[in-house]
Amino acid sequence: MSRPAKIQIDLTAIQANYQLAKTLAPDSNVLAVVKADAYGHGASTVANALESHVDMFTVSCLEEAMQLREIGIQKKILLLEGFFSQQELETGVQQNCEFVLHTSQQIDDFLAANMSQPVSVWLKIDTGMHRLGIPLGEAHAMCQRLLESNKVSQLVLLSHFSCADDPNNDYSRGQLTRFKNCVASIPPEFKSKLMTSMANSAGILAWPESRMDWNRPGIMLYGLSPFQQTHPEADKLIPAMTFSSEIIALRDIQAGSSVGYGNTWTAQRPSKIATVAVGYGDGYPRNAKSGTPVLVNGQRMPLVGRVSMDLISIDVTDLAEVKLGDLVILWGKDLNANEVAGWADTIGYELVTRMPNRVRPTYIM
Ligand SMILES: *Cc1c(COP(=O)(O)O)cnc(C)c1O
């Protein structure tokens, strides 16, 4: 028998979530973000399911782009971190990729390269995240250098929100204003070659002013909200990943008995404990606290004690009927990964993205 810990990916949900991104911003082009193996959902399969819908894909690096080319993906692919050598630049251009330029060195190297024809490039502007991008004060000069060269057919200015997970955060408004001012400062003769891109999932869902020529949805494609609180648009997303396993042992314990490594949880009453074949070796977060909900036969029941490598324990005392082999959902459509993440001091992004190879996904359409 194979290990019961499984993930199932609903490709129809991903298509529907993509459609929501499109509906919210019908005038924008969409760059589907499939970096980090499509946030753990399997970049090849996800890209195949989305290829006929999207305008372009985006990944972090050339290696991730090549994985998509190898399975026959033909749409353009944007590399968010640009190129790291002349060789990467050449290969990328040959492979119909576009690059985000985010340092003056990359701009110098790009301008020094031999190009058989002008290409479209993306220039990242640092509007306040201070992670990647050209400082605002230099943006104008860099745009001018790029646009005056004969190497650029189109320049897309982009920037990234640092606090968009809170739809009421004023810092995002400031970033947006700085970005718009930067775009406005580009001389009019270059405007025909200029495009703009600001919105990630949070921008698409909650910041209409951030929806520009190109939007960059990532997490929302996979059906998870980028927000900590509920939000009317985000609540329409359909989680694509279902993580499940089965009960492989059941026991009755007395009040005062402890469960799991370190005896971190002690029964306050006579309790029925279900042991489930899933643990941190399968991608379930080790720091999920006692009380983290799981669904046993569709009912919410609390995790108790520490998460082990291969096993977790659930208090099923309040469940009327339970037996070996019963299905346990760790997260999915009826138990949001973001909620589980909250119990483990992290975010849904991390939970789905770091799933190990031990659990092989199956796909439904
Ligand atoms: C990852 C990433 C995105 C997607 O962000 P989500 O919050 O997942 O929508 C967009 N833009 C850039 C630059 C990114 O690195």
Image: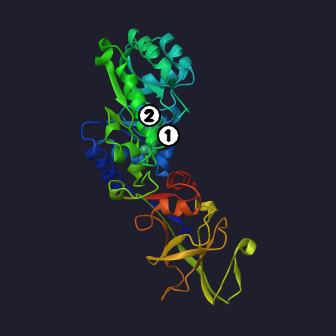
Q: Is residue 17 above or below residue 135?
A: below
Q: Is residue 280 above or below residue 162?
A: below
- Mark 1 and mark 2 in contact (Cβ < 8 Å)? yes
Q: Is residue 330 above or below residue 14?
A: below
Which numbered disc covers residue 175?
Answer: 2
Occupied quadrant, residue 239: bottom left
Is ligand 1 closer than 8 angstroms to the Cβ of mark 2? no
Residue at image point 47% right, 11% down: 114
Q: Amino acid at mark 1?
A: Ser
Specify the quadrant that holds the C terminus.
Answer: bottom left
Coordinates of residue 323 in the picture (x, y in percent): 52, 85
Coordinates of residue 225 in the picture (x, y in percent): 42, 54
Which quadrant of the picture is home to ligand 1?
top left
Name the element at disc 2: helix
Foreground: disc 2 or disc 1: 2
* C-alpha distance separating marks 2 and 1: 9 Å
Q: Amino acid at mark 2?
A: Gln
Residue at image point 49% right, 45% down: 37
Residue at image point 48% right, 60% down: 337
In the displayed structure image, the side of residue 115 where residue 310 appears, left or right:
right
Q: Earlier in the sequence, mark 2 or mark 1?
A: 1
Which residue in the structure is indicated by mark 1?
Answer: 162
